[in-house]
Image: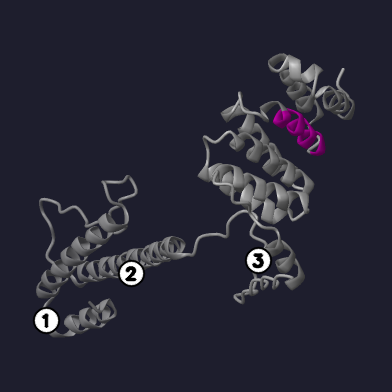
Amino acid sequence: MKLFVLPFLVSGLLFSVPAAAQESGVDKRVERLEKEMRAVQRKVFPGGSSRFFEPDIAPETETANAPATTTSAVSDLITRVDALERSLANLTDQVERNGFRMKQIEDKLAAMETAPAPPAIGDSGPSSTATTTPAAATPAPDPERVSAVAAIVMPDTGDAGEDSYIYGFRLWEAKYYPEAQAQLKKTVEDHPDHRRASFAQNLLGRAYLDDGKPALASVALYENYQKRPRGGRAADSLYFLSTALVQLDKKDDACRVLAELEDVYPDLASGRLARRVASGKQAANCR
């Protein structure tokens, strides 16, 4: 609807039809504009808001003895048309602005939903560039080390669990700690009920300690005591666990572990492991 042509149409009517006909035509336009403005108002202020308003120009109250229609009355109606046009234009503009704002909000929400997930905590990759740094290539194994490890042979006594443990022990004794860790893990996994399982798990913890990994050592040693309290190296695992805890700066916990060793294995604590228990208490500053 092109509202800007209304004033020109109304002006033309003033010169082409009698005053009564002009008033009738303008009245119809006024009614139509009022209906359109109410429709726009309902869209802007839905739900019967108190902000709903009537046109600023109200029709004059007719008296019982109304005079004949004059040119002045037609002019009043034209003024009403102008006011209605301005009100309708303002409301239409408000509807368009609100629609634009809603579109912006919807676009932002859609962008948030489709945005890639944030990097995981601890990700050290740069966030300001799309390029990714290639992972460092795994260094080739030292040929001499490979040959030395290959020279250590697994025994073949017919007892698979025993042979597997002895092979891991030999690797640890030669200070090939990563290889020893892998072999001792395999021993425990393949032979969990073998009498050497306690020995293998305990030596795994020691291999971690010797490799400078006290956190992994503490896990392996505690599991050995927890899962195999009657195993041949359960008490030893408590002692080495206290050593790992001291390295992790948890001396109070180390003292509690040594107290557990003395309570659960008093004979070993005062016998075979007496020197180790004493040195462990000294290292942890136990009272």
Q: Please give the residue where the numbered disc 2 appears in the rendered image.
A: 89
Position of the N terminus, as image quadrant, is bottom left
How far apart marks 1 and 2 lie (CA) works out to 28 Å
Q: What's the residue at 64%, 59% (across, down)?
A: 123
Amino acid identity at mark 2: Ala
Give the Cα separation between the discs numbered 1 and 3. 81 Å
Residue 17 coordinates in the image, percent (x, y)? 11, 81
Residue 275 left/right relative to 263: right
Q: Quadrant of the C terminus?
A: top right
Which residue is under mark 3? 125
In the displayed structure, does residue 240 sit left or right of residue 184? right
The residue under the point 12% across, 73% down is 25
The three-letter code of the residue at mark 3 reads Gly
Q: Which mark is residue 17?
A: 1
Work out whether mark 1 precedes mark 3 in sequence or the reverse, and give the earlier one: 1
**In this picture, residue 258 sits left or right of residue 86:** right
Identify the disc placed on residue 202.
none
Q: Residue at x 31, y 46 (%)?
A: 49
Secondary structure under badge 2? helix
Chain part drawn in magenta: 236-247
Between marks 1 and 3 in the image, the one whose residue lies nearer the viewer: 3
Q: Callout 1: 10 Å neighbours few (<14), some, many (20+)?
A: few
